[in-house]
Image (cartoon, rainbow, N blue to C red):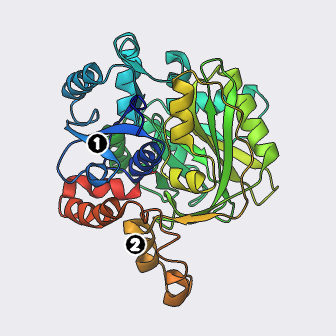
Amino acid sequence: MSPHPAPTRPAIVTDGLWRKSLSAIRSLGKAGFEVSVLGDSPFTTGFWSRFTEKRVVSPTAAADPEAFGRRLMETLEQTPGGVLLPMEDESLRWVSDNRARVTALSRVLLPSREALTLAWDKGATLAFAREQGLACPRTWNPKDADELAEITGALEPGAFVVKPASGSGSTGVLYGAKRSREHWRAHWERHGALLVQERVPESGRGLGASLLFNSDGDCVAAFAHCRLRQYPNSGGPSTDRRSLHAPALLEQSIALMKRLQWRGIAMVEWKEDPRDGIPKLMEINPRFWGSLELAVRSGVDFPVLYARAALGEKLAPVMTYPEGVRCRWIIPGDILRFASQRAAERESLREFLRGLPGLAEEWDPRDLPGTLATVICTGAKALNPRYWKYLARG
């Protein structure tokens, strides 16, 4: 045994409830990091991974930003020099707004405030992309709910989608049905400003370009995937996806993010338009994404690469990976997708079960406690109506 043990490398993962957070915890733990996890209850899935060294009970930034910030800073003070992975939009927003305090104690890769603001504003993102010559769906930015009602009233049913103008993920997204002015006012009140977007036909493939930029603005990891299935079936986070070789898509995505002088992690979301075969830019997701585990299993280990880049290591770019690797979000995503899909459209039960548990992103033979927690914690959260809205999250 060496008389000088290797120094520990601390890492802090926020929002430990989410499946992407569990993926990050597992990756970092296997790479030798001592992982602290923030979560708002004992039913935080990431608390129960065997790769979690410390559980930090904290309100989420979405629920109580001030209390979240206090608890995060306490954790950073106890683990100086640790790598910080903010996993959710509101956590990232708090870290960005307090970057001087955070970076004094931790290692974190952050885009500029201006770049983050643009990425969170879907209308601004698409306007910027059009200036760069990228293909985008037609988009309207109503000033209020009444103007939104007028715009949607003039469009064909099914030809548009309404989504929150700020943020990422599928919460608050509504697809092309006619609704009353009162409905739009209530939806605006609940989700904030909304935009209207031409809907790319459902048959078009959903594509994702996942990227990591180091502190110098160099892209050090790139990965593309396509959606196979999603929940809700009308449009939502992917429940089944596979890795994809898409050099042109990655090249366009990297060029876009470089124009923003991006730092850190991002996924550029596209949808291939079956009418002309051209991918159309949908949005920029400036945080770790829901299907993170697929990239990890394909050999592009974004959490570990992010941590190493944040620590200042010089990384050889990771741009190659096998095509056709599949990974499924089973609990509860693909189960709900299968149960809610019309029998004539879904696969047989035998086909649904094919490849399990290996294809399930929840499954890790080196982390059976974490695997079990995905079942128990998800079941416990399902009993609380507060979490029902998150079933349709990216």
Between residues 108 and 308, which one lies in front from this camera angle?
308
The residue that mark 1 highlights is 53
Compared with residue 56, is residue 275 higher up or lower down, i.e. above or below? below
Between residues 5 and 32, which one lies in front from this camera angle?
5
The quarter holding residue 4 reads: top left
Classify mark 2: residues with Cα within 10 Å, few (<14), some (14-19) or many (20+): some
Residue 318 percent location from the top left of the image: 70, 40
Left or right of 271: which side holds 89?
left
> Could you tell me the amino acid type at mark 1?
Glu
Q: Please report the residue visible at 28 percent of the width from the left and 61 percent of the height from the top.
A: 373
Question: Looking at the image, is mark 2 or mark 1 earlier in the sequence?
Answer: 1
Residue 112 percent location from the top left of the image: 53, 17
Classify mark 1: residues with Cα within 10 Å, few (<14), some (14-19) or many (20+): some
Q: Secondary structure at mark 2?
A: helix
Q: CA separation, marks 2 and 1?
A: 32 Å
The residue that mark 2 highlights is 336
The quarter holding residue 130 reads: top right
Q: Secondary structure at mark 1?
A: strand
Q: Please report the residue visible at 37 percent of the width from the left and 67 percent of the height from the top.
A: 332
User: Do callouts 2 and 1 mark residues in contact (Cβ within 8 Å)?
Assistant: no
The answer to whether residue 121 is seen in the rendering is no
The answer to whether residue 299 is seen in the rendering is yes
- Look at the image and tell me in which quarter the N terminus lies: top left
> Could you tell me the amino acid type at mark 2?
Leu
Compared with residue 92, is residue 202 higher up or lower down, i.e. above or below? below
Left or right of 200: which side holds 249?
right
Residue 138 percent location from the top left of the image: 67, 41
- Image mark count: 2
Q: Nearer the viewer, mark 2 or mark 1?
A: 1
